[in-house]
Image: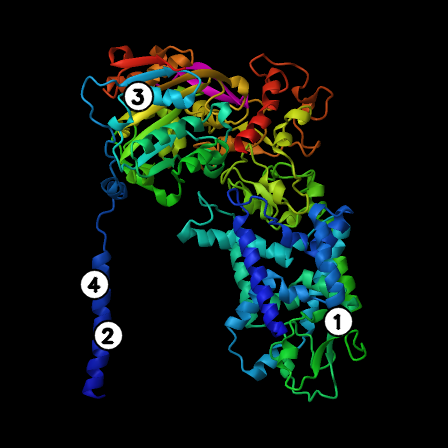
């Protein structure tokens, strides 16, 4: 054998040996023990920023409007809060989060009224908002929910962008709440937004009795949500800790009094003719719960949240307004 | 322009149309597109369902649009319109590495090409008894099924183009690899599926017997060079005695003939032609016998009646099981259009006859309350075109009550509040009826630590339950759910009914007793409200 040939062939084999060793060395995982996957997930988790606006201690933090014209009520209530300009800056991208959990017609009261959503979006536009995003991760099929609830039509009319909950829209988010540590969250809309406004209907709920502005954030979570019911009050009280919205709107133009959260019959719905805007979700929901004809003293998640200083159930101690529109 | 170029344009157009219809067969894009048209013009679907049901369901009358020209021209469908044929031709062309001589040899008629006629005879014999099996191999059904179950889910993985929430289909890999195999076989035998297996091709081949225009070979001009075979799609022997039943009317032979010896003539001399399919009587009888025997063998296996399986929960609006098997062509359009992914292609759940027919699997989805899309696209009426009003039992359908697909049952050994002292009732939350079919009772129990705990334990009201399965779908006991919907109680079959009141007792769906004023079972005070609902629904969505 020629020397050159010998060196070439031995060299090739030597390189293959070295490559195998190097590859094994690089990939060798000495950890084990089971927990490290979870640790890596927690380390990579995103954190949601606060979308709240600092308006000073004495600003109006809750405005209740009564009336029949949704647009006038939205304008009047936000007006009482100091006007939309106090919340939305020119060029802001605004995420509107309606509750579109179910495939239902608007009059059934199981979803946010498209009229209210449209009015809030219009106000944001007037304040110079750039992109307006509408997003929710429904229980029923997303496309059907957005279509039948009328929310898609409302979003189209106002030129808002609808973000559907596709797999790629979800990220692990660090919550560090009482129950939720990190959780798979519908992150894409949050990532695209400068300001966040939750717009929730006022509904009966079979398990936690009331579904309002706090419970609304359930719709921004993904993963195994069907486990939440095992500790529902802890979960709901984690939401005001997880999401710090710019504003919340409680749409009680119609109130789903029973058979919630799905409803399904007009006899389940009462006319509420009320709309509440606020920055303290606990306060807004405490008031909203009375619209269901129930005593807030019995709604556990409100008190859990209040104990954690995430809001107050004693809303009358806030700077609040109540107005009749029209 | 050469006729073969026109043909190519036609093929591209129809392939594109097929892709387009495949894509728009979903909630957001469906609009009014006639997405079932390929299945409706399919004469095999029309003829076979006419044999099983003695009727021609709705749009199937469009099959005349294909059948009549076939009587004049022959199997032009196979090489001008059929998307599956186009896929085979394209694949064969793309991977063709044969020399001209090898091409000529690969396009000579072989005896195995008669197999499709025996397949057709067997399926026809089964159809005579009411077992519709053509969908196993009908090219449109097969291709639509392959797209629905394997191709689109595959394309969706990297792109998210087709579903908001990804769809899965049980045994999709079988359908996927079957498609891969059948298309791949073009490398071994060109147009393998079309020439050897296709029962639609066989049907059209039989009809070609009457066609007035045929390829004619001028024996004076012909020098027997066999060059007409080099791109002959159907292997119809244009170089010698034409086999009209095999000819795809692709016109390649006319293109390729260097001596202008071939032409497409009106009523050419039939002498020297093989006018009909070359099949042996003994084999035909054997095929017919196998097809005929398949009926008693499978029916007396009991899957349709005594031994029907609880998993065979059919989509809402389905006809009774024996009629379902007369109608379902396994095209899986319903599975494609289903927005929730609840519909799955069956393997053996419904017996051997029910392979690839749609069944509801509540682990992958649930039946969306305000949705009737599956019946909307069903070309044969296996799933009837019912309205939302009819599905929910509103308005004029109030007396009949809602369409039930089955009934939900608790497995108390697995249910968290029942077995493990843990709060849950997701099932009650998502139950879509009003009043809810799932209700709960609060009980105070003493847990293992001696503490008093109040638990909410769920129950099913079988009168109100419609079997939509959203309770099962949302149940957190993921692997074997603590509430499961089975077929019993389904509206379509009196034999499988559960409650006396629902089995046709005179009092309608209440079983007699009126319930409380808060809504009752949907037959009392609640009904008035719900009947108004549809108008609201429609006007709000308009």
The mark lying in front, picked from 2 and 1, is 1
Quarter of the picture containing the C terminus of chain B is: top right
Instruction: Determine whether the residue tagged by mark 3 lies in a helix, strand or loop.
Output: helix
- In-image side of A117 versus A243 (left or right): right
Q: Residue at x 67, y 27 (%)?
A: B397
What residue is disc 4 on?
A: A22
Distance CA(mark 4)–CA(mark 2): 14 Å
Q: Is residue B449 above or below residue B72?
A: above
Q: Which of marks 3 and 4 is nearer the N terminus?
A: 4
Q: Is residue B291 visible?
A: no
In the rendered image, residue A120, in percent from the top left (x then y), is placed at 36, 28
What residue is disc 1 on?
A: B213
What residue is disc 3 on?
A: A79
Do labels 4 and 2 touch, CB within 8 Å? no
Q: Which residue is drawn at 52% across and 27% down?
A: B432
What residue is disc 2 on?
A: A13
Q: Which residue is drawn at 44% across and 17% down?
A: A68
In the rendered image, residue B146, in percent from the top left (x then y), is placed at 55, 55
């Amino acid at each position: 054998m020629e020397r050159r040939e010998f060196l070439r062939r031995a060299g090739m084999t030597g390189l293959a040996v070295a490559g195998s060793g190097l590859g094994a060395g690089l990939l060798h995982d000495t950890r084990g023990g089971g927990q490290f996957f979870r640790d890596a997930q927690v380390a990579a988790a995103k954190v949601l920023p606060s979308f709240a606006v600092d308006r000073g201690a004495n600003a109006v933090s809750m405005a209740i409007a009564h009336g029949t014209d949704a647009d006038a009520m939205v304008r009047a209530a936000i007006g009482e809060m100091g006007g939309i300009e106090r919340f939305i800056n020119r060029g802001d991208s605004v995420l509107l989060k309606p509750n579109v959990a179910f495939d239902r017609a608007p009059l059934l009261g199981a979803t946010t009224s498209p009229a209210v959503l449209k009015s809030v979006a219009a106000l944001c536009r007037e304040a110079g908002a750039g992109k307006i995003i509408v997003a929710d991760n429904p229980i029923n099929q997303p496309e059907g929910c957005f279509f039948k609830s009328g929310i898609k039509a409302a979003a189209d009319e106002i030129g808002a962008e609808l973000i559907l909950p596709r797999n790629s829209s979800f990220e692990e988010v660090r919550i560090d709440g009482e129950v939720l540590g990190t959780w798979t969250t519908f992150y894409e809309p949050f990532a695209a937004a400068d300001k966040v406004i939750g717009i929730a209907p006022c509904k009966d709920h079979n398990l936690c009795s009331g579904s309002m502005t706090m419970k609304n954030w359930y719709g921004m979570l993904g993963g195994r949500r069907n486990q939440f019911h095992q500790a529902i009050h802890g979960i709901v009280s984690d939401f005001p800790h997880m999401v710090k919205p710019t504003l919340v709107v409680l749409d009680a133009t119609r109130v789903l009094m029973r058979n919630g959260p799905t409803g399904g019959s007009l006899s389940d719905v009462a006319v509420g003719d009320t709309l509440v805007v606020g920055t303290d979700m606990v306060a807004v929901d405490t008031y909203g719960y009375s619209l269901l004809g129930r005593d807030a003293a019995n709604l556990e998640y409100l008190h859990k949240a209040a104990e954690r200083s995430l809001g107050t159930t004693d809303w009358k101690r806030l700077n609040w307004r109540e107005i009749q529109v029209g | 322009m050469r006729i073969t170029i026109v043909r190519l344009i036609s093929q591209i157009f129809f392939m594109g149309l097929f892709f387009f219809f495949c894509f728009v067969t979903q909630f957001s894009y469906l609009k009014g597109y006639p997405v079932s048209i390929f299945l409706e013009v399919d004469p095999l679907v029309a003829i076979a369902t006419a044999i099983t049901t003695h009727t021609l369901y709705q749009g199937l009358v469009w099959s005349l649009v294909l059948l009549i020209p076939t009587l004049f021209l022959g199997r032009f469908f196979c090489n001008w319109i059929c998307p599956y044929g186009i896929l085979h031709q394209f694949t064969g062309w793309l991977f063709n590495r044969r020399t001209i001589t090898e091409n000529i040899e690969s396009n000579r008629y072989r005896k195995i090409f008669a197999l499709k006629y025996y397949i057709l005879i067997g399926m026809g014999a089964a159809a005579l008894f009411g077992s519709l099996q053509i969908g196993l191999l009908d090219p449109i059904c097969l291709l639509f099924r392959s797209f629905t179950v394997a191709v689109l889910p595959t394309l969706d993985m990297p792109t998210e183009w087709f579903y908001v929430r990804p769809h899965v289909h049980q045994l999709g890999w079988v359908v996927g690899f079957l498609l891969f195999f059948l298309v791949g076989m073009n490398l071994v035998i060109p147009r393998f599926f079309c020439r050897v297996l296709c029962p639609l091709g066989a049907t059209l081949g039989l009809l070609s017997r009457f066609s007035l225009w045929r390829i004619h070979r001028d024996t004076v001009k012909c020098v027997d060079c066999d060059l007409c075979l080099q791109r002959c799609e159907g292997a119809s022997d244009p170089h010698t005695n034409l086999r009209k039943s095999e000819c795809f009317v692709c016109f390649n032979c006319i293109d390729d003939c260097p001596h202008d010896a071939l032409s497409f003539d009106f009523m050419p001399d039939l002498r020297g032609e093989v006018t009909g399919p070359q099949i042996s009587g003994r084999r035909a009888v054997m095929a017919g016998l196998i097809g005929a025997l398949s009926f008693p063998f499978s029916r007396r296996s009991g899957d349709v009646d005594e031994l029907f399986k609880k998993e065979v929960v059919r989509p809402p609006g389905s006809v009774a099981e024996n009629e379902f098997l007369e109608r379902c062509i396994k095209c899986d359009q319903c599975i494609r259009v289903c927005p929730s992914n609840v519909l799955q292609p069956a393997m053996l759940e419904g017996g051997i006859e029910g392979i690839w027919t749609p069944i509801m699997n509540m682990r992958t989805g649930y039946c969306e309350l305000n949705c009737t899309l599956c019946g909307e696209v069903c070309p044969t009426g296996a799933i009837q075109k019912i309205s939302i009003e009819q599905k929910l039992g509103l308005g004029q359908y109030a007396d009949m009550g809602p369409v039930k697909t089955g009934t939900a049952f608790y497995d108390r050994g697995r249910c968290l509040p029942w077995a493990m002292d843990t709060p849950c009732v997701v099932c009650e939350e998502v139950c879509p009826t009003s009043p809810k079919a799932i209700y709960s009772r609060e009980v105070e129990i003493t847990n293992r630590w001696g503490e008093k705990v109040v638990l909410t334990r769920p129950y099913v009201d079988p009168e109100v339950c419609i079997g939509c399965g959203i309770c099962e779908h949302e149940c957190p006991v993921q692997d074997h759910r603590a509430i499961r919907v089975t077929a019993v109680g389904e509206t379509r079959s009196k034999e499988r009914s559960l409650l006396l009141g629902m089995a046709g007792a005179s009092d309608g769906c209440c079983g007699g007793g009126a319930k409380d004023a808060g809504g009752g079972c949907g037959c009392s005070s609640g009904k008035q409200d719900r009947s108004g609902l549809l108008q609201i629904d429609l006007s709000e969505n308009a």
